[in-house]
Image: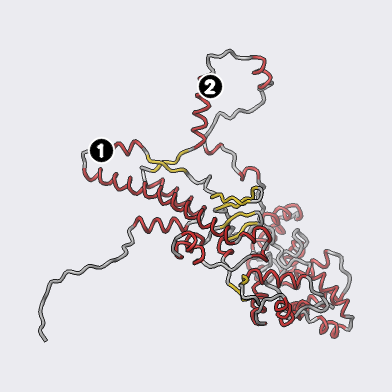
Amino acid sequence: MKMGFELNLSQTQKLIMTPELRQAIQILQFNNVELTDFINKQLEINPFLESVDNKSDVASNDEQVVEDKGNEEVDWIELAERYDDFSYKTHDVYTDDENKQSFESYTSKKLSLKDHLMMQLGMAVKTNKDKRIGEFIIESLDNKGYLGCSLQDISLLINESVVDVERVLRLIQTFDPVGVAARNLSECLMIQLKEKGIQDKNAYIIVEKYLEDIAANRIQKIAKDLRISVKRVQNICDIIKMLEPKPSRGFIVDSDNIRYIVPDATIEKVNDDYVVIINDSYLPTLTINNHYKNMINELEDKEASKFLADKLNSSMWLIKSIEQRRITLYKVVESILKFQRKFFDEGKEALRPLVLKDVADDIGMHESTISRATNGKYVQTPRGLFELKYFFASSVSERDGDGVSSTSVKTIIQKLIDEECPQKPLSDQKITEKLKEAGINISRRTVAKYRDELRIPSSSMRRRY
């Protein structure tokens, strides 16, 4: 076999992911909140980008109107009536961002659990010793409002007697919210039962010994052990289930990671038709800074001129990518509206099967583009706020050959369970048979899967006596 070196030419096609293309794909994946943060960062690093304030344009127009009316005669009587007694009225002479009223200016600030308890402690104790013990106990509470350490450990750490620590703990357990500073779930529920004035000793026994049986709905076992009627145990369990197992609920805790959802699009009903509106009105409006744009041709330094040219191209591409994202998102939402029109007219039961390929073929784009455009984005509709992925549901076969979406089947299952007899709840097999009568052919295992996804317990757990 002859071996040697040769030089050959060949042509191949490759898709090269340029930085601009990567940025366009990234922008398409952003939701409104992420896109706002990205634009603000670009405004900091790119001198060519400039944010346009629409209010400044309105102010300039108002000034022009004032100049036009400067030569007109002033009606002093009308002016006096309009600004009658302005001596005590405030005037908006500042237009800085820091002086603008925001939504947070009109909302109340939630109090943290520890601050709420500290305030009550200051009014309940009289000595510095009790205050120091109480502050240590409050600071030792976990995110659920439970005391995470023993009284002996607290006594050793603050060098106080166990009797004093327990006395202050009992005092704190009378604070609002009821059940706070309990050492376990049973103690928390018993504190709430005492606060409600429950005198039945069986309620306290059930809380202390039979919480697991309540969770498993073993009502007959509890009635047999306590030698009371099943109906009475059922009533006690109903009272216990109304108690709060997490006293800190409703208060701010340090581990709260609150994520606010801003809809990326809105579907509004106008007469008998629906209109798609892309919610980008509050996004920064970008434009090119003319000062730096003119500077490119004036600079003699080639490196500086190249740097400015690259920044100009980058800013132009960013503006174009944002506009392309808006157009793509509009087309996707409009296509979803066309496929799921019956959902918006009739409700969840009318949601039809839909996959990414259907929308991609409808608007002439690739499935990956549709996936990026719908990922993590929400739409506000007359029927509520939904993630765009919600409208893409798998298909379940019907008797007539047509498909029905899995979301529609879940809605039917939920409706059947809501209308069932509490004493004789529907089993998964019964639900399967009722669905078959309605023309929906699915297995019992699928019904159990959908029921679990709806967080509905089994028939034995739902049964009431």
Indicate whether 266 appears above or below 207: above
Residue 264: % across, % down: 54, 53
Q: Residues within 10 Å of mark 1 (few under 14, many from 20)?
A: few
Indicate whether 224 appears above or below 386: below
- Which residue in the protein does label 1 denote? 297
Q: How many marks?
A: 2
Please tell me whether mark 1 sits on a helix, a strand or a loop.
helix
Picture quadrant where residue 341 is located: bottom right
Please tell me whether mark 2 sits on a helix, a strand or a loop.
helix
- Which residue in the protein does label 2 denote? 66
Residue 53: % across, % down: 48, 38
Pick whichever, 248 or 332, lies toward us. Answer: 332
Rendered-image quadrant of the N terminus: bottom left
Residue 7: % across, % down: 13, 71
Pick whichever, 227 or 205, lies toward us. Answer: 227
Indicate whether 122 appears above or below 9: above
Looking at marks 1 and 2 on the same chain, the residue that comes earlier in the sequence is marked by: 2
Q: Which mark is residue 332?
A: none
Pick whichever, 31 or 189, lies toward us. Answer: 31
User: Is residue 312 found left or right of 219 in the rendered image?
Assistant: left
Q: Amino acid at mark 1?
A: Asn
Q: Amino acid at mark 2?
A: Val
Indicate whether 342 appears above or below 61: below
